[in-house]
Image (cartoon, rainbow, N blue to C red):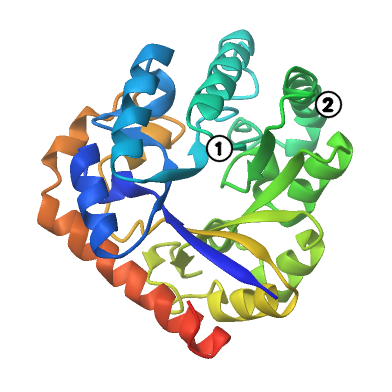
Amino acid sequence: MSKFTLSAFADEIHRDLKIQMDVLEQHKISYIELRGVNGKCICEYSLEEVKMIKKQLDERNFKISSIGSPVGKILITDDFEPDLRLFKHTMNIAKIMETKNIRMFSFFIPQGENPANYREEVMNRWKQYVKVARGSGLMLLHENEKEIYGDTAERCLDVVQTMNCEYVKAVFDLANFVQCNEKVFPEAYDLLKDYIYYVHIKDAVYIDGHVVPAGKGDGKVKQVINTLFNNGYEGFLSLEPHLTDFDGLNDLELNGVASLDTMEKKSEGEGARTFAIALKALKNIMVEVTGGEL
């Protein structure tokens, strides 16, 4: 029997953790994919600060589905040591937050260059993640993302198969595949189905890559969710609306800055409104697929 558990990137609602939790409570969502907290990436906090954030979450009965880390989201030609230190720090954050899942990437490729030229370095770096994480109980979840090595389904498969271990799996992000001109379903899904451990729910259109509510674009969201359901998937559907140019987005892009301070420009009402739109679209699909069970 399939079991979907809803989670969300709450920093798209508001920078303030309290407001994030207020809105999620209204929608009866108790899991967060933790990324931006009070204007900073969770991975920028000290472990003592993380413990204080965990206490706030516990007081409201929120759990963490995954750490939405930026690990591996640097140029493949950049120095790897700071990223590896960040990974080790993120592992400690995950343990404090009582989640086994860490979302990760496989490095931006210099513009215009052939990703194959950097395959060996990508794999060498990922093997270091794997070595450090061995025995930790953590899951290293590779997300497909435009302009990194693993932006296509074929190269995502290459990463997880080359690592060849039970704690490296795939995050399946439908909109990101659309933005890379990949055919999401059945092609990308069928290629990765044995490794999909976690799903990001957002949709996009091929014409220009802009993000739309689930089911309104070319990501075949309903077909993917229906197939997951029929195949007995038990795991998270993590809502990442991206319906507006949310203020944290630039921080996670190749040429972005490191701080989430500009999130203060987002009003509570606008973030909550666009989140509700995205959630309603997803729930409509889930009701159709499951026959009314959420």
> Residue 185 sits in which quadrant?
bottom right
Give the Cα distance between marks 2 and 1: 30 Å
The residue at 60%/75% (across/down) is 225
CA neighbours of label 2 inside 10 A, class few (<14), some (14 to 19), many (20+): few
Where residue 111 sits in the image (x, y, percent)? 58, 35
Q: Secondary structure at mark 1?
A: loop
The residue at 19%/64% (across/down) is 273
Check disc 2 and give the amino acid type: Glu
- Give the side of residue 42 with respect to residue 170, left or right: left
Q: Point out which mark residue 120 bears.
A: 2
User: Is label 2 or label 1 in front?
Assistant: 1
For the N terminus, give its image quadrant: bottom right
Q: Is residue 15 visible?
A: no
CA neighbours of label 1 inside 10 A, class few (<14), some (14 to 19), many (20+): some
* Nearer the observer, 234 or 253: 234
The residue at 29%/38% (across/down) is 59
Where residue 240 sits in the image (x, y, percent)? 41, 55
Q: Point out which mark residue 99 bears.
A: 1
Check disc 1 and give the amino acid type: Thr
* Nearer the observer, 63 or 116: 63
All told, the count of numbered labels is: 2
Q: Is residue 225 visible?
A: yes
264 w.r.t. 31: above or below: above
